[in-house]
Image: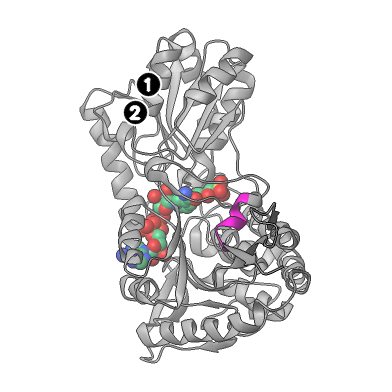
Amino acid sequence: MITLKDPSLLKQQAYVNGQWIDALNGETNPVLNPATGEQIATVPDLGVEETEAAIAAAEVAFKSWKKKTAKERSVLLRKWFELIVANKDDLAILMTAEQGKPIAESAGEVVYGASFIEWYAEEGKRAYGDVIPSHAVDKRIIVTKEPIGVTAAITPWNFPNAMITRKCAPALAVGCTMIIKPAEDTPLSALALMELADRAGIPAGVISVVTTKRPIEVGKTLTDSPIVRKLSFTGSTPVGKQLMRQCADTVKKTSMELGGNAPLIIFDDADLDKAIPAAIASKYRNSGQTCVCANRLLIQSGIYEEFAQRYAAEVAKLEVGNCSEGEFQQGPLINRAALDKVAMMVDDAVAKGARVIAGGKPHELGGNFFEPTIVADITNDMRLAREEIFGPVAPLFRFETEEEAVQIANDTEFGLAAYFFTRDYARVFRVSEALEYGMVAVNDGILSTEVAPFGGVKESGTGREGSKYGMDDYLEIKYTLVGGL
Ligand SMILES: NC(=O)c1ccc[n+]([C@@H]2O[C@H](COP(=O)([O-])OP(=O)(O)OC[C@H]3O[C@@H](n4cnc5c(N)ncnc54)[C@H](O)[C@@H]3O)[C@@H](O)[C@H]2O)c1
Ligand SMILES: O=C[C@H](O)CS(=O)(=O)O
């Protein structure tokens, strides 16, 4: 049972063309609390017909939405931002109930998600073009930036609020419209955002949320439609690749925020009093279920044992529990399959000679809970070295030299986030420039902010979200030549 100050924020219908609707087939999809397995809500199982209706509504709405001035759109986005912040507590309760993360993290995500709407409400007024010095005396060259048009977003369960606002805020700010398909596990946060968008006065059809337990079918409807001119996806790399293939037939623009395998490197000269709490935050945020979590901890040999001992002492303080019922630092994994995968990765490492120094198995609470874990003496043949863990497991690698650390760090198909700790400022520039990642944090464990470009290289994706760069993903460049002057 979810208790909200404003119970009307718990929506159990999809939001299409400004209307709350059920599925045409009357089917629904249960929404479960991952901490208890109990059903907390149901949402409609929309399919092709409803998705096509959402696309058609977005196409109609685009014609008038793009004609509003950036300032007029800004006023509505600002109102939406203010309503989200005003309802932060209820949105956090909803998020923890459907995703499991600690309430404080849910509240933090609501504020982080709202910050993209706040940022792009202003940035949308700065979609500047150019006037280029002409090549001919009787001609003028004007470059303008125009909204791409109808866009689609497919988003993951681990940040069910911010991964949506990080996409729809720049899209709406520049005049695009958007159809969102949230993750089946966590639709309630998306629907609550739509209720507040409606209250803010964002017109019907500008933004819709299609809930479904048929993501492939709905996804294909979005990727196959020639009306949809852009797809923004956040999720796993294999699904991202499939969606890029599907978008090729209509030459859609795509933004891909995909998987990660973040190295967190601690050199001998690092300040461990700062590096250890940062490494805890980076690894165990959302119970390790973030794309930018430290996925491999690379510790220089001179401090390896001291770090392992001090890190284990801090990990032992992490309390695990149902975050809807108490203040814990670690919640459940999203489902049983996720828990089984993490357990198998730890078992694989131990079978190949790794050493568990904290946790190492499913938590005594049962269900989807896993013990906060540290595994030492990791080698490159282990799954913990090669795969995105997406769980509360810290694999410790030992290295001798800076060159070896960079080589290990770059030895992956991923390139999203990387972290390193040193007090040598020549090394700061050497290592940051050598790391093949879209984002590098030095002497810090958290790098996500709306003012900076979030995104990866290699198989972690394309495009950026946040900052002025994130707006370019929703704009087309038009060149106009005025002749006969
Ligand atoms: N780079 C980032 O910013 C970022 C942020 C969050 C999560 N992620 C990544 O997402 C993954 C975890 O999230 P997840 O398990 O939800 O990922 P996922 O790829 O399984 O699912 C993501 C979304 O895609 C949908 N989906 C799945 N298969 C589809 C298909 N064939 N066609 C259309 N839609 C489909 C799902 O319903 C969900 O809405 C991790 O790899 C994580 O690194 C990346
Ligand atoms: O999981 C991926 C998210 O992008 C994490 S963050 O909230 O942006 O740090």
Nearer-the-camera pick, 338 or 471: 471
User: Marks 1 and 2, how far apart in space?
Assistant: 6 Å
Instruction: Please give the residue where the numbered disc 1 appears in the rendered image.
Output: 407
Dot 1 crowding, Cα within 10 Å, few <14, some 14–19, many 20+: few
Indicate the colouring scheme: one colour
Q: Which secondary structure lies at badge 1?
A: helix
Q: Which secondary structure lies at badge 2?
A: loop
**Residue numbers of the magenta segment:** 469-476
Side of 216 relative to 446 (left or right): left
| Mark 1 residue type | Gln
In the picture, the quarter occupied by the N terminus is: bottom right
In the picture, the quarter occupied by the C terminus is: bottom right
Q: Which mark is residue 411?
A: 2
Side of 172 relative to 223 (left or right): right
Q: Is residue 424 visible?
A: no
Residue at image x 24%, y 22%? 353
- Where's residue 440, x and y in %? 55, 32
Up the image or down, 273 lies above or below 77; here it is above
| Mark 2 residue type | Asp
